[in-house]
Amino acid sequence: MKITPLGIWGAYPKANGATSAFLVEEEGFRCLVDCGSGVLSALQTRIALHDLDALVITHYHPDHIADVGVLQHGVMIETLLDKRSQPLQVYAHADDEDQFSNLQYGKYMSATAVSPQQTQTIGPWNVDFCKTDHPVHCLALKFTDKHDASVVFTADTAWTSDLFPFINGSELLVSEASTYQSMIDQIPGHLSGRQAGQLAHETDVEHLLLTHLPQYGNVDDLVTEAKDVFSGEVTLADPAKTYRIGKG
Ligand SMILES: [Zn+2]
């Protein structure tokens, strides 16, 4: 499984950047995780738009859905130009019915409701969902391939032990790290670098990848905070890199 960061910023993008989103690829199947500000542009530095097979949305905050409208336009135009023959499959929770219904876009984009109660098959993966602690309903994601390799995306969350059993056994934890430990009380609904490290420690993952980063301060300090409590590998998500887990 290949995991490529497309954007690494929380809330809003830095200059020439994008908000938190990832491209997940295996067996030629390509899935976008979240579609926030700047993501459609970043995606096309990696793949042609018509090669995108699926999109999973964790929650309906703008830094995770801002580019959905322009993605719909892109998919429509590529379909009209005969570059795409299938609708783009979109998976998201339907807790917010208005937001969920906005994902459906004629014959171009087809939305499927997901929930923590049910594993969803998406391309070559089984994808599981876990409710996080966030001001709006938000789902963490776990992609597991047929070789049993798995990656968890925390999406947006405050500290919660509810995620422990969900993350346990995964090789890679892609965790939000929205602020610094000294400022955690000022940024509710999110994790500090230290808390992301604590999550990795409690769940015994091999590699912690930090994303949804703050625009302020020195983000390298987030790695230092995480390493204070977690002895595995810790890195800042880097849009110039692709991370591999498992055999695929
Ligand atoms: Zn959010």
Image: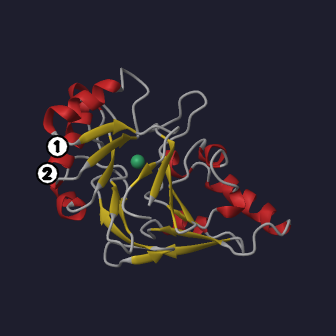
Q: Secondary structure at mark 2?
A: helix
Q: In whole angstroms, how far apart are the C-alphas of marks 2 and 1? A: 6 Å
The answer to whether residue 67 is visible is yes
Q: Is residue 191 left or right of residue 50?
A: left
Q: Is residue 158 left or right of residue 20?
A: left
Q: Are marks 2 and 1 in contact (CB under 8 Å)?
A: yes
Q: Is residue 130 left or right of residue 37?
A: left
Quarter-of-image position of residue 165: bottom left
Q: Quadrant of the C terminus?
A: bottom left
Q: Which residue is mark 2?
A: 202
Q: Residues within 10 Å of mark 2 (few under 14, many from 20)?
A: some
Q: Residue at x 61, y 67 (%)?
A: 53
In the displayed structure, 178 sits above or below 40; it is above
Q: Amino acid at mark 1?
A: Gln
Q: Quadrant of the N terminus?
A: bottom left
Report x, y in % for residue 239.
Answer: 51, 39
Q: Residue at x 19, y 60 (%)?
A: 162
Q: Amino acid at mark 2?
A: Glu
Q: Which residue is mark 1?
A: 198
